Image (cartoon, rainbow, N blue to C red):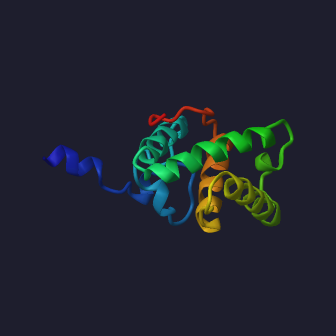
Amino acid sequence: MEFHSKLLQPLPESKARGWNGPLPFYMTYPDAYAPGREQALLQDLEYLQQMYPQDVKRYQKRIADILDKADYEGSMIYDEYPDRCSLLALTKSICRVLEQEDDCGPAEDMIQVLLCNEVYKRRHGGRRGSYYFL
């Protein structure tokens, strides 16, 4: 038990090499921001997405299909800071497509959240269509 409690203790500031002053909280815990951790985070996100309700899963898949058309070299989804107005316009166009396919369309806020999740996955190396629930 003592071994594990030592692993979870913050690193003393005197032992951090090359840093002058107080350490940010994320630098005091081991493996908090390690390189190569992005793939594990994406797998965790995809695992949690399989717990979405059935309608939301369907919307997520349809959003991914629509976003395939906007997924190209130089697309605005890969900008360092994507334009909020462009994302909102894309959200509204996705809502119009989904309303035409269904009798009553989904809430725009939900579509915006699902769109942002899909953009995040694509920007950070997520594989299109790699859902566990399909």
Coordinates of residue 64 in the picture (x, y in percent): 65, 42
Closer to the camera in the image, 54 or 131:
54
Left or right of 54? Residue 8 is left
Q: In this view, does 13 lie to the left or right of 110?
A: left
Residue at 74% x, 38% y is 68
Q: Is residue 106 positioned above or below 118 on the image?
A: below
The residue sitting at the right extreme is: 74
Residue name at image x 63 percent, y 34 percent: 128
Residue 19 rendering spot, x and y as whole percentages:
56, 55
Between 115 and 9, the residue placed more toward the observer is: 115
Horizontal arrangement in the rendering, residue 29 relative to residue 80 (left or right): left
The answer to which image quadrant residue 108 occupies is bottom right
Q: Residue at x 63, y 44 (%)?
A: 62
Counting from the top left corner in percent of width and height, residue 28 is at: 43, 56
Total marks drawn? 0
Q: In this view, does 40 lie to the left or right of 122?
A: left
Relative to residue 41, is residue 106 depicted above or below? Answer: below
The one of 27 and 68 positioned closer to us in this rendering: 68
Q: In which quarter of the image is residue 11?
A: bottom left
Extreme-left residue of the structure: 1
> Toward which corner of the image does residue 69 lie, by quadrant?
top right
The picture places residue 57, in percent across and down from the top left corner, at: 51, 47
Which one is in front, 42 or 18? 42
